[in-house]
Image (spheres, rainbow, N blue to C red):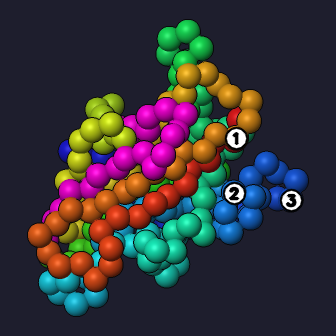
């Protein structure tokens, strides 16, 4: 399953005061732009692996601390677009390209090249969300969704996606999508094998 390769790193915790997406609105840290590897596989001591999340070039975050973060998308960003489908329904599309990180979270998966092994990433809804979340590669093929499937991630892989957040209509208030991400592997893990992450769309 090929997906868009990663580019430069960078992150921004907040935008200007008065914006609908400020630090501390949806979590202790609202991430409104930058390069994020929501699933980041490291090897603290081979063959043991660790599931973490990495924001820019910062220190990897343990899954148990992810409640302190929300990934916030403001549809004023050129990387965020509402796409109508049938009737009032549609989805918010987050661009796959690296230019996304200048105005919105550019979220993908990473497996450090120094670490041997491979595994499968899964994603599911953590409670009631406005709709499904689906990930697409640069060829326009779905590679993962909250309703089905897994994504194979091996040593040295670094993948970014077009994210689609589905909804029955284009809301006028912030919409929260709570998701679980997990990593299934035969290798031992020094962390838990899943994490919870909050994604917020601000119309």
Residue located 38% across and 51% down the image: 160
Residue located 54% across and 45% down the image: 177
Relative placement, left or right, of 198 versus 42 is right
What is the span of residues highlighted in magenta in the rendered image?
117-137
3 to 15, vertically: above or below: above
Q: Nearer the viewer, mark 3 or mark 2?
A: 2
Q: Which residue has dot 3 on it?
A: 17
Do the CB atoms of the residues marked 3 and 2 lie less than 8 Å apart?
no
**Would you say residue 27 sits in the magenta stretch?**
no
Q: Quadrant of the C terminus?
A: top right
Residue located 74% across and 30% down the image: 172
Measure how far apart labels 1 and 2 are at the Cα level.
Answer: 10 Å
Mark earlier in primary sequence (3, 2): 3
Q: Secondary structure at mark 1?
A: loop
Image mark count: 3
Q: Which residue has dot 2 on it?
A: 26
Measure how far apart labels 3 and 1 are at the Cα level.
Answer: 17 Å
Instruction: Please name whichever residue, 143 or 8, is drawn nearer the observer in this view of the structure.
Output: 143
């Amino acid at each position: 399953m090929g997906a868009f390769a990663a580019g430069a790193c960078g992150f921004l915790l907040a935008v200007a005061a008065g914006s609908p997406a400020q630090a501390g609105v949806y979590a202790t840290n609202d991430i409104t732009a930058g390069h994020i590897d929501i699933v980041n596989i490291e090897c603290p001591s081979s063959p043991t692996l660790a599931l973490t999340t990495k924001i820019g070039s910062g220190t990897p975050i343990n899954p148990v601390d992810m409640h302190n973060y929300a990934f916030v998308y403001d549809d004023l960003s050129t990387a965020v677009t509402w796409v109508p489908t049938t009737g009032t329904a549609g989805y918010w599309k987050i661009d796959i390209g690296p230019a996304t990180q200048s105005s919105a979270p550019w979220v993908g998966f990473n497996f450090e090249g120094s670490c041997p092994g491979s595994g499968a990433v899964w994603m599911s809804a953590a409670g009631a969300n406005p709709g499904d979340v689906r990930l697409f590669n640069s060829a326009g093929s779905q590679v993962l969704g909250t309703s089905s499937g897994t994504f194979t991630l091996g040593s040295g892989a670094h993948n970014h996606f077009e994210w689609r957040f589905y909804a029955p209509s284009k809301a006028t208030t912030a919409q929260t999508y709570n998701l679980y991400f997990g990593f299934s592997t035969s290798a031992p893990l020094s962390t838990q094998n899943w994490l919870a992450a909050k994604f917020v769309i601000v119309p």
